[in-house]
Image: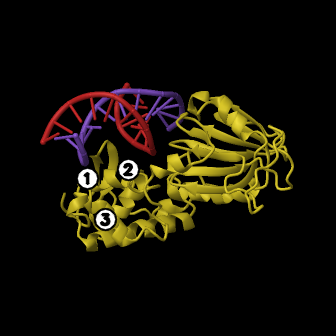
Chain colours: A yellow, B red, C purple
Amino acid sequence: MPELPEVETIVRSVRGELVGRTIREFVSHWPRNTLPSAAAARRGCLGGRISAVTRRAKYIVLRLETDAAGGKPNSRTGRAPRERRDGRRSAFPDGGFLLIHLRMSGRLALLEPGEAEPKHARAVWKLDDQRRLVLDDARKFGRIVYAAGCEELFGALGPEPLAREFTAQALYALLSRRARQLKPLLLDQSAIAGLGNIYADEALHRAGLHPLASSRALSPADAARLHAAIRDVLRTAIRRQGTSFDWIYPGGRMQERLHVYGRAGAPCRTCGTPIVALRVGQRGTHICPRCQPGA
DNA sequence: TGAATTGTTATCGT
DNA sequence: AACGATAACAATTC
């Protein structure tokens, strides 16, 4: 289940291949999860030149421009490119944003000409170099969103934990203005963006905090430890290209560094106490009862 | 076979 | 009323 580090790894690996390419065709094989509709997404994509590939939370973000650099008319509408009064190109040229959320089992594949599509291809973009970008997703939870702008969608998300603005003080403020169990709060994308089940468990263990502890009960020092733990575990995971533990996400090496996730019964790497599995907010949760006391 | 997984939405309780 | 917790849901694999 791709979380922030896995999505970041994917984004970095495809960025160089995709930037500069133009989308020539788009086909959705699972229109239910193509928003606002398969037809609208296709209209938005066609003729779009991919000008940037970035990440927000667990979204892969492709910025599209149909406002050709040479000032050529829009290939689809025939309109001339929009210009601002100062002559530079608008901050929001024709085009828009293609957002891909892999959810549980989604993967991206870039196929060479003639290469067969994977078994669970849910959407295919044909590029101007004859290659195809494919969303391969066994469980069909993955979503594709085409939007002219992503402010509305991203505005509902909490801060990026690796951003400069995400300080220990900001985390303390965020925790203390609600009274929620720590783990569900960490998983809440509108509170903090990008954490999933693995890294929420890992961050809590590294901070020595119990997943059921109330966010309001944390001291500024607790929040500072959690802040450092979150950023630490995410940075380490990105450096190791994410966690691989099943067929969904191959290639990462972070699983060797996990302290609690998936280690029920194994000795805590800090104190040797057996790791305990429990359920918190319907999610499998792993703790060291000695390093993470209380509730 | 049922457990596991994400994020949204609806509903229940305090 | 507002907030937080809870459950259901989409679909598939092992």
Instruction: Establish whether labels 1 and 3 are both on one chain.
Output: yes
Task: Report if the CB atoms under discs 1 and 2 are less than 8 Å apart.
Answer: yes
Q: Earlier in the sequence, mark 1 or mark 2?
A: 1
Q: Tag 1: residue type?
A: Arg
**Dot 3 surroundings within 10 Å: few (below 14), some, or many (20 or more)?**
some
> Which residue in the protein does label 3 denote?
A173
Instruction: Establish whether labels 2 and 3 are both on one chain.
Output: yes
Q: Earlier in the sequence, mark 2 or mark 3?
A: 3
Q: Tag 2: residue type?
A: Asp
Q: Is residue A137 visible?
A: yes
Toward which corner of the image does residue A265 lie, by quadrant?
Answer: bottom left
**Position of A202 relative to C11 (above/below):** below
> Which residue in the protein does label 1 denote?
A180
Whole-number angstrom distance, CA of label 2 to CA of label 3: 16 Å
Whole-number angstrom distance, CA of label 1 to CA of label 3: 13 Å
**Dot 1 surroundings within 10 Å: few (below 14), some, or many (20 or more)?**
some
Q: In the image, which disc is placed on residue A188?
A: 2
